[in-house]
Image (spheres, helix red, strand yellow):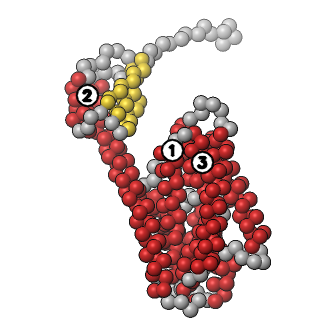
Amino acid sequence: MLAATMTPEDVVRIERTLFFEPPQMRSRLVRFGMLILFASVIATGGLLSDSVASVIGAMIVAPLMTPIMGMVVAVVIGSGSRFARSAIIVLAGIVLSIAVGWLMATFMPHGWDPTTSDQIMDRTSPRLLDLVIALASGGAGAYALSRVDVADALPGVAIAISLVPPLNTTGVLLAAGYGDLATGAFVLFLANMGAILLAGTIAFIATGLATAVGRRAGEARSALIGILVFVAIIIIPLRANSTYLWLEATREEEALAIVRDWLEPTDWDIYEIRVDGDEVTILIGGEGELPPAEDAVQKVMDTIQDDITIVVRMVNVHERTIETTPSPGD
């Protein structure tokens, strides 16, 4: 259980860490802008090159969690002006991150397809599990900020919760003309941001921030309800997408079993089976005659129980041994 033992000194430390205020406001804004710029370039480069290490590095550099946590603290202590200022900074970071992704993607060679990058595609289909991870990360971030002795956990929180990469992904996909995928990436960002607001507010109340500033925890009820409504709205597409992905995975497993039985008496192998909406793509390779496919096709159609199109791509494999004559010195 979290102990509500926050002191006035803790409050001052948290406010200095999260709020962009005089006399350091200008220098902090410049630093924030530069770090967002650098993090976006690193992350977008990692997305375009499909580099996991670059994307993780960008998560550590990106400072976007600071003003989002500032919004959280402003809600808990009841400061509307600080909330508005932090929200404006967050909005500026969002615009800059998307713009960098869009700009860098426009310089990619003609014909380059962003859907070939796993780092990009992994951020276009958010699930409920992503929200659960973000909730835990947001709570951990607030708890780490409230206690000096666990502040070392903040870099891990930055890695666990993805803020800038989904925004860069949004820009990249918008530049490439994939508006639907860009929407998915932006929903992932909104889910992560909403989770930080919700879990962070609860964690800061639990650690005694409201009490330390002379405010009753119940006074933040209206703002907390607003955050809950925002997260509930985000849950709708996350739940729908989670169900869709689970259904496709189940269909792929069932189709795989059917095709495996069909090819059992042959020397053909299954390379890939992919269910994408109403299309089932089967990639097989081997040599020799294939058995009749009618029964297998009907079983796949009966299993999926939809009007589907089955596409079978075959790769003929021919094995050949090349004999070499040993050189005289061997």
Q: Which mark is residue 179?
A: 1
C-alpha gap between disc 2 and disc 1: 34 Å
Q: Is residue 60 left or right of residue 307?
A: right
User: For the residue marked with disc 3, what is the amino acid?
Assistant: Gly
- In this rendering, would 11 be left or right of 136? right
Does label 3 or label 2 sit earlier along the sequence?
3
Q: In front: mark 2 or mark 1?
A: 1
The residue wearing badge 2 is 297
Element assignment for label 3 = helix
Alpha carbon distance from label 3 to label 2? 41 Å
Type of amino acid under label 1: Gly
Badge 1: few (under 14), some or many (20 or more) residues near its Cα, within 10 Å?
some
How many marks can you see? 3
Q: Which mark is residue 171?
A: 3
Task: Confirm or deny contact between disc 3 and disc 2 (CB under 8 A).
Answer: no
What residue is rendered at 64% in x and 60% in y?
93
Q: Position of residue 87 (x, y in %)?
A: 60, 69
Badge 2 vs badge 1, beta-carbon distance below 8 Å: no
- Mark 1 and mark 3 lie on one chain; the one further toward the N terminus is 3
Spot occupied by residue 74 in the image (x, y as percentages of width and height): 58, 78
Q: Which mark is residue 127?
A: none
Kind of residue indicated by mark 2:
Val
Q: Position of residue 128 (x, y in %)?
A: 41, 58
